[in-house]
Image (spheres, rainbow, N blue to C red):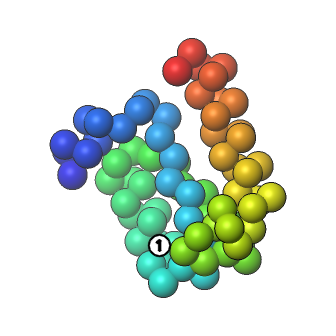
Amino acid sequence: MDGLRERLPPDAMIIGGAGDSRPADALRRLGARLGCEVTVVPDAGHHPWLEAPQRFAAVFRAAVDRQARRGG
């Protein structure tokens, strides 16, 4: 896990769907271990970019904007 953490950009984010077969709590635990923000998209499953594209795009855009403001 440490090797993965070292390879992630400073403000990495995990985006998952609420209806994914992996429980949202598992994503949150992973995010905590990696030091990543976790966003769970409601009304989406394993492919939130396909199942809730507008919500996913808003979350993704916000993450990219935050990264850009921080100079990343």
Height in image: 12 above or below 39?
Answer: above
User: Residue 44's spot in the image, x, y percent?
Assistant: 67, 75
Instruction: Please name the residue that numbered disc 1 is placed on.
Output: 25
Residue at image point 32% right, 53% down: 33
Residue at 39% over, 54% down: 32
Secondary structure beneath dot 1 equals: helix
* Most foreground residue, 29 or 54: 54
> Alpha-carbon neighbours of circle 1 within 10 Å: few (<14), some, or many (≥20)?
few
| x and y, in percent, of residue 11 in the image | 49, 34
Identity of the residue drawn at 73% across and 51% down:
57
Q: Residue at x 39, y 44 (%)?
A: 35
User: Would residue 18 be seen by someone viewing this image from the given angle?
Assistant: no
Which quarter of the picture shows residue 46? bottom right
9, 33: nearer the viewer:
9
Q: Relative to residue 5, is residue 12 drawn left or right?
A: right
**49 up-or-down from 17: above or below:** above
x%, y% of residue 26? 41, 71
Q: How many marks?
A: 1
Q: Residue furthest top?
A: 71
Comparing 2 with 55, the one in front is 55
- Residue 58 visible, this orientation: yes
